[in-house]
Image: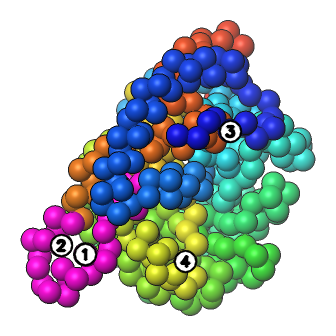
Amino acid sequence: MRPILATEAAALTPIAPELVASENRRLEPELRSDFEHLGAQLARRGVDIEAVVARVRRLAVAIPSWGVGTGGTRFARFPIPGEPRDVFEKLEDCAVIQQLGRATPTVSPHFPWDRVDDVAALRERAVQLGLGFDAVNSNTFQDLPGQAHSYKFGSLTHAQKAVREQAIAHNLECIELGKKLGSKALSVWIADGANFPGQQDFAAALDRYLESMREIVAALPPDWRVFLEHKLYEPALYATVISDWGASILCAQQLGPQAQCLVDLGHHAPTVNIEQIVARLIQFQKLGGFHFNDSKYGDDDLDTGAIDPFRIFLVWNELVAAELRGAPGFDPAYLLDQSHNLTDPIESLIESTVAVQRALAQALLVDRARLREQQEANDALAANRTLRAAVQLDVEPILAAARLRSGGAIDPIAAYRASGYRARKASERPQGLAGRSGIV
Ligand code: RM4
Ligand code: MN
Ligand code: MN
């Protein structure tokens, strides 16, 4: 393996670089030997391990600002000592994730949760920490104190124009904030829908959505995209206006080339074939990006890969295939969207980023020429074996080498735990002031 490359002249590092270096020195001999062994195995399959490492190093996944605070359920939230109280502290926690993992250089903000008086100072702070900003998320699913109109019965699709106008204005403000922060996309997820059959005129609600979204799209800078996020239920429990990828792609097609669909893995019924949806969206140039997470029952927002790692691999299998064939207009944005109710959010986000990288690395191992032959010969069993062969090798040495060469930690969780970061923050960020920053 090549020697450790010098870290990009970074920024403020919340964890002492010497600690990361000494942890790496301890683990590097073992990694070197595992890496060489895996490299030899892959060479026998005709795969160059260095090419896989290089591609994994190029992957960037955005951290959701709302993910670094502890989340909760409808029943309770159990805050942990030292969690961030505002967006500046959230950025610092995101910088830890980036320092150790080196795959998460951007943060996706959520407004008004991340509202600040001085947006330039926020951007400056991010630069100091070596971070940038990714897609801006608007929020018209809850009311703020003092807000003129309530979103109880909808926002962009509300029956009353004044409510729709307020929701549109909020999205336009998000675009303005994003411009100041260096973002290039707006994610729109609306909670609009109905709890009762008969409550809502399906066609009228969708017409109003399109009318509202047209105004938002018209305000986008030319190099921006808007991501339409669908979700089948919750908080609306009978019908949501943008319920599935069908509604999403129809709207994206109506709204023009800057509008694309966002796939949040938790926003589908449990048995839905998400990888096929991904393939369809790619084929019609409407795949905007992802909110990665995992789920067992619904929008559980569990850690990526925690429940069904094979599904994430199958999604990446489509993404890698599209990349290799140079699918036109293919440029998805990768974000995590999770709620950490039981774990230290920094640890979960580190693990989840690695889960995304792992699925990418595995997808890069698929023997696509052989798979094609087997598909064309209708050899179902062999085709499935070819696909599964890619997940039967342990790719951890590739992921660790990618991190090490990018200046991160071979074992980022061990380095984080050894750093005592959370205990330090527990004294620097006094309890009682902790804001409600996670998802409930
Ligand atoms: C929603 C959806 C959105 C996220 C909010 C917090 O279920 O996933 O992407 O912004 O939760
Ligand atoms: Mn989401
Ligand atoms: Mn969600």
Checking the image for residue 383, the label placed there is 2
Query: Residue 148 vs residue 19: left or right?
Result: right
Decide which of tag 1 and tag 4 comes sooner along the chain: 4
Q: How far separated are the C-alphas under marks 1 and 4?
A: 22 Å
Q: Residue at x 71, y 31 (%)?
A: 92
Q: Secondary structure at mark 2?
A: helix
Q: Residue at x 76, y 41 (%)?
A: 8
Q: How far separated are the C-alphas under marks 2 and 4?
A: 25 Å
For label 2, being within 8 Å of ligand 2 is answered: no
Residue 160 image point, x, y percent? 61, 74
Amino acid type, label 1: Leu
Residue 150 image point, x, y percent? 61, 57
Amino acid type, label 3: Leu
Q: Which residue is mark 1?
A: 371
Q: How far separated are the C-alphas under marks 1 and 3?
A: 36 Å
Decide which of tag 2 and tag 4 comes sooner along the chain: 4
Q: Badges 1 and 3: C-beta atoms under 8 Å apart?
A: no
